[in-house]
Image (spheres, rainbow, N blue to C red):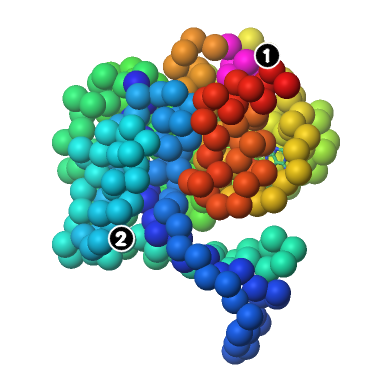
Amino acid sequence: KITVIGSANIDYIMQMEHLPSPGETVTDGTFAQAFGGKGANQALAAAQAGAKVSFVGALGHDQTALDYKQSLEAHGIDCSQLSLEDEWPSGSAFVMIDRQGNNCISVAAGANAALSPERVHAVEALMLQSDWIILQQEIPQVSNQAVLAFAREHGLPVLLNYAPAHDLSLHLDAAVHGLVVNEIEAADLLDQSFEPGDREAVLKLAEALRRRGGHRFVAITLGAHGVVLSDAADCTYLPAFEVDAVDATAAGDTFCGALALALGEGQSLPNAGRFASAASALAVTQLGAQSSIPTRQAIDAFLLS
Ligand code: ADP
């Protein structure tokens, strides 16, 4: 059983030929609205991969939020701890994407700010029953701290996706069993940039990051370069699966959700990493965030192909 405590956003996506400069208006956009937010994406990725998932989050209280909640429930996710807040609009992400796939994103936390430490205390029983608790960085930092404090006290396994990297104030220690970061977040945490293609360097950095925080394992995802995994036993580099990449949105989220599911099933870190790499490779072959997250059947078939 996996509990995700994190964000849910409504994504407002505009695709256009080129991104506007300050003061410029471009008028060739194609608009789409989608359900997103790292927390909910990861909850969905774990559920699609076959996990029993509870999502703890907060949305506004309007028709779109109700539709969103219903969509998560339709995928089998327990949403009894997903609150609909009267005083807040849902979290929103304005996403502009150009023809080449470059993007500019602006996020308003909205109701995600209502996911307070009190809400965390209210789900302690749920946390105690979980094989993994998954966190990201789109809810108040004090709430993540409250989860880590409780997990530390009770020895509960937490997987933290330290994303986005804008706020690096969360204290990282052994309460974070698994730390998952992409190359940008890893560079921010280590205060050191690196070449994602330089395997030796990345292996060393993953090892350094793991030792520094006393984590059981660290995963540094490297986009099309793959992922590096470090635990006490080993440091492994797994190349990415070769696919026709269409849209990298939610690649990292799919990786985290699938990784937690596979580890929860008792798979070794390298095997779980391979499973998560397959899930996220499939996700980048489809446009969109939640709509691109593959099912268990699709992941297993891809691994056998
Ligand atoms: P984030 O979305 O957090 O930036 P990454 O871009 O590092 O995360 O992607 C996470 C994982 O998704 C990678 O480790 C890899 O397994 C997979 N992935 C991402 N981009 C590609 C790609 N172009 N081809 C195949 N797999 C990919």
**The label number, if any, that marks residue 64 in the structure image:** 2
CA distance separating discs 1 and 2: 46 Å
The verdict on residue 83 being magenta is no
How many numbered tags mark residues here? 2
**Image height of 235 relative to 122, above or below:** above
Question: Range of the magenta residues?
Answer: 268-274
Which residue is under mark 1?
Answer: 234
Q: Is ligand 1 within 8 Å of the beta carbon of the residue shown at mark 2?
A: no
**Image height of 164 relative to 136, above or below:** below
Q: Earlier in the sequence, mark 1 or mark 2?
A: 2
Could you say where residue 259 lies in the image, as x and y percent from the top left?
Answer: 53, 26
Disc 1 to disc 2: CB gap under 8 Å: no
Q: Which quadrant is the N terminus positioned in?
A: top left
> Quadrant location of residue 244?
top right
In this rendering, the label closer to the viewer, 1 or 2: 2
Q: Residues within 10 Å of mark 1 (few under 14, many from 20)?
A: few
**Magenta highlight: main SS:** helix
Secondary structure beneath dot 1 equals loop
